[in-house]
């Protein structure tokens, strides 16, 4: 690769992301791979040209960039490549590993199969499998052979080994759709919290050039199937992506089908040809339905859903006082850049355990920093807040005297997630009865694909939240999105208000607002259902109604 004089942040981040993936595939230290992936995310979110910082020897000023990563970045900027990355690509053979991950086998076995059978594509592997050659590979017996044969026949409706979180799913499709001039569809377009169906739709009279470009994309390492106007490709992580090349007059119809859900689309078949979705709905004589609501069959008129531009402020963020990476003023300035009118600083309390928590005295000291920020940034308002732990007996981790001083109080469960349902419910209910609690953070305590929801009686929780005038948070961290959509709708139907918060621990974290608002949309939320669509005076009134 030639020397890159103007290497953009996005390109640098993409190379580090590839390096992280290949390190994982090669069985390297998992901490190294994570460090490179975090560095890629940091660089992608940095506004300054990172290449200039690297040349000036200042890149380590970015939090999370250590000496080792600095060396790789310097090599990339000076030579246009990372030598070890090129070596890993030759050694690991990502096309084979991606296909193997899709089939549910590890990197080493995928490479062993490919080398033993001298195959490099899904079609070649399928031919070898049908010919009964899989058992030539050491370690593959009848059961493994049957499993692989079944996996190779999934091309009609392929699925990844496990669902992708919304931020990774959307980024993956954007990297494929953008260079093709297409639109991301599938589960990510409907804002599902964990995506399994991925599609990109492109409008073009001639399909062949688009299909060729798709197959040559860095993100696509293997092609499962190719037809006249569609193809299935696989990423190095084993994620299958469908490409649909629609004739322009049918683009809306094909985008609608590729967006899904399968059940929603099937209920409206047969579909007329349409150049866009708005025209399609008119031809069906139905009101337009936003993608987030296209799950179960539905033919009524949807509400005017919450928009990202309706959000006036963020009511859950962290700073260096606990486990955040930025000061109060820096977080406030970032919120102002997003067009917000207010930001609540809700650092942790001592019972959280894993990170530093603020005592009552700490919060009173923090108040001086918040006052200084408010003086400097008026009319923007930084709210004094806390993410106060709910103790196992339901008491709050701070005394009433300090809670009464604050503008906003988030109550949270962090420890004791495995309590029995009745005990967990009573614990949270007791906290909601406090006259100082404004909102319950990440109410069900889930981590998507990692930890199940807490055992909690959601009906009782919503009942008490309504009685006490406490809002329920939809937490925008991509691995939380808690409350989930079905509970958000249940809360809205009962009259309980939601708060769409990012739980930001950094400037970049404030960008989680797009996920915090997408999940309530799936729960049919309007702007009136969300507290932080309101002016500051109304939010402060919500502090205790």
Image: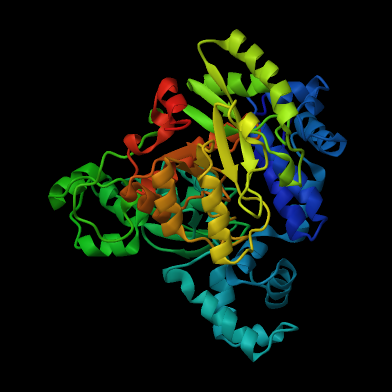
Task: Please state, as top left, top right, bottom left or bottom right, where the C terminus lies in the image.
Answer: top left
Along the viewing direction, whichever of 440 and 313 lies nearer the viewer = 440
Q: Position of residue 100 (x, y in %)?
A: 64, 68
Q: Position of residue 183 (x, y in %)?
A: 40, 44
Q: How is the image coloured?
A: rainbow
Q: Residue at x 67, y 87 (%)?
A: 135
From the viewer's perspective, tell me whether residue 17 is left or right of residue 453. right
Along the viewing direction, whichever of 380 and 359 lies nearer the viewer = 359
Residue 104 vertical position relative to residue 326 in the rendered view, above or below: below
Residue 272 vertical position relative to residue 510 in the rendered view, above or below: below
From the viewer's perspective, tell me whether residue 18 is left or right of residue 84. left
Residue 8 vertical position relative to residue 143 in the rendered view, above or below: above
Along the viewing direction, whichever of 469 and 416 lies nearer the viewer = 469
Q: Position of residue 80 (x, y in %)?
A: 74, 34
Res. 320 visible in picture: no
Task: Please state, as top left, top right, bottom left or bottom right, where the N terminus lies in the image.
Answer: top right
From the viewer's perspective, tell me whether residue 31 is left or right of residue 255. right
Res. 407 visible in picture: yes
Residue lying at the far right in this picture: please name it. Answer: 67
Q: Residue at x 49, y 57 (%)?
A: 195
């Amino acid at each position: 690769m030639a020397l890159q004089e103007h290497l953009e942040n996005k390109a640098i981040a993409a190379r580090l992301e590839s390096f992280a993936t290949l390190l994982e595939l090669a069985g390297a230290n998992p901490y190294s791979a994570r460090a490179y992936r975090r560095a890629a995310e940091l660089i992608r979110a940095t506004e300054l040209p990172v290449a200039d910082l690297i040349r000036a020897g200042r890149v380590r000023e970015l939090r999370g960039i250590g000496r080792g990563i600095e060396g790789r970045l310097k090599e990339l900027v000076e030579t246009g490549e990372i030598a070890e990355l090129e070596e890993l690509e030759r050694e690991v053979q990502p096309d084979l590993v991606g296909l193997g991950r899709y089939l549910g086998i590890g990197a080493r076995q995928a490479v062993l199969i490919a080398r033993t059978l001298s195959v490099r594509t899904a079609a070649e592997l399928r031919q070898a499998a049908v010919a009964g050659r899989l058992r030539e590979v050491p370690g593959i017996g009848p059961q493994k052979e049957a499993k692989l044969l079944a996996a190779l026949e999934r091309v009609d409706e392929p699925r990844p080994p496990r669902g992708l979180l919304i931020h990774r799913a959307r980024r993956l499709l954007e990297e494929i759709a953008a260079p093709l001039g297409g639109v991301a569809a599938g589960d990510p377009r409907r804002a599902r919290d964990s995506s399994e169906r991925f599609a990109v739709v492109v409008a073009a009279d001639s399909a062949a050039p688009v299909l060729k470009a798709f197959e040559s994309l860095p993100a696509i390492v293997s092609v499962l199937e190719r037809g006249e106007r569609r193809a299935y490709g696989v990423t190095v992580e084993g994620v299958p992506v469908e490409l649909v090349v629609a004739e322009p007059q049918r683009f809306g119809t094909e985008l609608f089908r590729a967006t899904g859900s399968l059940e929603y689309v099937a209920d409206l078949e047969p579909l007329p040809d349409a150049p866009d979705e708005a025209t399609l709905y008119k031809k069906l004589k139905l009101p337009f339905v936003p993608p987030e609501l296209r799950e179960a069959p539905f033919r009524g008129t949807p509400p005017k859903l919450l928009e990202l531009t309706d959000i006036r402020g963020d009511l859950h963020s962290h700073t260096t006082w606990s486990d955040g990476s930025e000061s109060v003023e820096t977080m406030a300035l970032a919120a102002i850049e997003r067009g917000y009118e207010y930001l609540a600083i809700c650092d942790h309390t001592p019972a959280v355990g894993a990170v530093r928590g603020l005592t009552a005295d700490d919060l009173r000291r923090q108040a001086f920093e918040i006052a200084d920020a408010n003086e400097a940034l008026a009319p923007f308002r930084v709210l004094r807040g806390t993410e106060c732990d709910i103790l196992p007996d339901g008491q709050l981790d701070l005394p009433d005297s300090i809670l009464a001083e604050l503008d906003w109080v988030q109550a949270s469960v962090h420890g004791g997630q495995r309590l029995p349902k009745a005990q967990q419910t009573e614990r949270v209910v007791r906290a909601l009865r406090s006259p100082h609690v404004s909102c319950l953070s990440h109410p069900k305590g889930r981590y998507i694909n990692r930890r199940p929801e807490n055992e909690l009686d959601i009906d009782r929780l919503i009942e008490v939240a309504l009685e006490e005038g406490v809002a329920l948070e939809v937490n925008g961290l991509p691995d939380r999105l808690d409350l989930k959509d079905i509970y958000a709708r249940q809360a809205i139907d009962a009259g309980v208000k939601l708060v769409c918060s990012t739980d930001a621990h950094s400037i970049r974290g404030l960008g989680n607002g797009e996920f915090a608002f997408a999940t309530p949309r799936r729960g049919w939320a309007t702007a009136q259902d969300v507290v932080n669509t309101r002016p500051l005076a109304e939010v402060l009134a919500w502090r205790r109604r």
